[in-house]
Image (cartoon, rainbow, N blue to C red):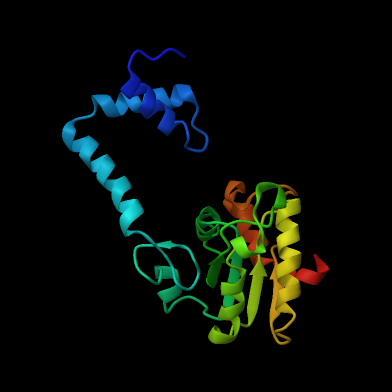
Amino acid sequence: MEIPSKILETAVDELATLPGVGKRSALRYALHLLDASDSDFAAFIGALTRLKSDSHYCSRCQCISDTPVCPICSSPKRNQKIICVVENVQEVMAIENTAQYTGLYHVLGGVISPLDGVGINDLAIRELLDRIPAEQTEEVILALPTTMEGDTTNIYIDRQLKQFPNLKVTTIARGIAIGDNLEYADEITLGRSIVNRIPFEKA
């Protein structure tokens, strides 16, 4: 695709690095921003700047937050004794949309995937293990993707959780198809999978 302006081409190349954005879509976005009013463009750039400079990761669950502790962790309406372990922030939002879960979360930031260079120490597993005695957690729900990498991570975490003999370890029911990510599941299926969770060892 021939672009007549080097400045425009650079903008297109940067936009095309976003997930799911090809060169043609990136060109449309760049041209839209070019035609935007100065105030709209400034608001767009300001939002991205604040996203990078002012957003935090919750000190408890590692989810994205505007404050050191996110609204979910700090809410008195949440069950503080249950932690649902997920891969990323999108899966927190997917589960929240079901309105079927009232506990807390723990965002690992990925799953074990040696081919992608993601190992145990790259994930927030130690932080999870530290939370359990500190917060007197009674149940951990393993809600990672039903992929080989997700299952490997589930098994590793389950083994680490054996050190807490009174801890209940469950996983979401297999209403989620094998190989699916939670963020793509419909809300009804995902909600039922959370409600009908089963002991991890029986999964």
Residue at 65% across, 51% down: 117
Task: Decide: is 193 above or below 166.
Answer: above
Residue 173 visible in the current orientation: no
State left or right for residue 194 relative to residue 58: right
Task: Decide: is 172 above or below 60.
Answer: above
Residue at 66% across, 63% down: 120
Q: How far across and down, in percent of the image, does residue 33 sit?
A: 29, 29
Task: Decide: is 41 above or below 132.
Answer: above
Residue at 58% across, 80% down: 130
Task: Decide: is 62 above or below 184.
Answer: below
State left or right for residue 120 relative to residue 148: left
Residue farthest right in this picture? 202
Q: In the image shown, does 11 or 158 lie closer to the viewer?
A: 11
Residue 130 visible in the current orientation: yes
State left or right for residue 57 relative to residue 125: left
Quarter of the figure with residue 101: bottom right
Q: How far across and down, in percent of the image, does residue 189 sit?
A: 65, 53
Q: How far across and down, in percent of the image, does residue 186 sit?
A: 60, 48
Of the 4 image quadrants, the one containing the C terminus is bottom right
Label total for image: 0
Q: In the image shown, does 81 or 27 lie closer to the viewer?
A: 27
Q: In the image shown, does 30 or 146 lie closer to the viewer?
A: 30
Q: How far across and down, in percent of the image, does residue 105 sit?
A: 54, 68
Residue at 45% across, 73% down: 73
